[in-house]
Image: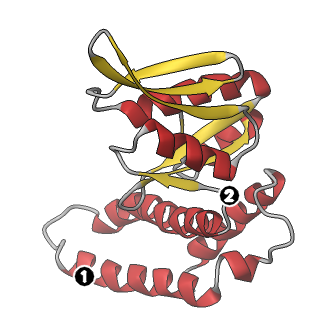
Amino acid sequence: MEPKVKQQAGDLFILAKKANLLSSEEFSEVFPKSTLSKISGNIIEDEKVFLQNSRTVKNPEKIWMEGIQFRITADVSQIFIDYLQEKGRAFTLDYDSPVEDVVFNFKSTSSDLDISDTGEEKIDGDSYQGMKIGEDVFKYKMTNQYIPGDVLFDIGRKLFPLSRALLCTNFGDQDQYLIVDLELAPEFTDFGFLSL
């Protein structure tokens, strides 16, 4: 197995334990050896192809090494976020999710906020979807293409005073989200997670 793959997975596993995203799970449960070996095998094969096709490139080994860390980070982080989602500690949203779905998915992952969907209503002939966090009500015009992003932004603003952060990944086909302590958010960005 490629040592960098195992090291990256180990570092992320330790950070996840520190963030209380994992409790009694063993490393091999989150990062099965066969999965990490597959990542390593793919990297080795791709490196051979890359070097064979880069004969005219100056310093192809250096170029390969500069790009490989990003790939390892993305592959390992995708395994991790998929595991968390399977366990109900992370969630996925489609780009066109209604407010109701965003609120439902957030609530299924976190109890940090007193949050609810307020349904749809017409205001001056326009349709809006709403959300309530504590006493604050938020309205989103249904013609807005970025409703999920706006809703998540407002959720993130309410998490901030609680010293919590909403993180996003887009390694796969859909954006995936998790909530961590604000002080640990910068450490997660080293693994490709974006803070909202």
Residue 37: percent from the left, percent from the top? 54, 87
Check the image and report above or below for 54 versus 134.
Answer: below
* Residue at horizontal 32 percent and vertical 80 percent from the top: 46
Three-letter amino acid code of the residue under disc 2 = Arg
Instruction: Evaluate whether residue 194 shows in this view.
Output: no
Q: Which residue matches tag 1?
A: 49
Tell me: 43 left or right of 133.
left
Tell me: 120 left or right of 180.
left
Disc nearest the viewer among 2 and 1: 2
Residue 62: percent from the left, percent from the top? 36, 62
Q: Secondary structure at mark 2?
A: loop
Label 2 to label 1, Cα distance in Å?
Answer: 38 Å
Instruction: Evaluate whether residue 146 shows in this view.
Output: yes
Tell me: 158 left or right of 171.
right
Q: The N terminus appears in which quarter of the rendering?
A: bottom right
Judged from this view, the residue extending furthest toward the right is: 24
Callout 2 crowding tier (Cα within 10 Å): few <14, some 14–19, many ≥20: some
Check the image and report above or below for 183 versus 160.
Answer: below
Which residue is more in the foreground, 15 or 95? Answer: 95
Q: Which residue matches tag 2?
A: 89
Check the image and report above or below for 128 versus 187.
Answer: above
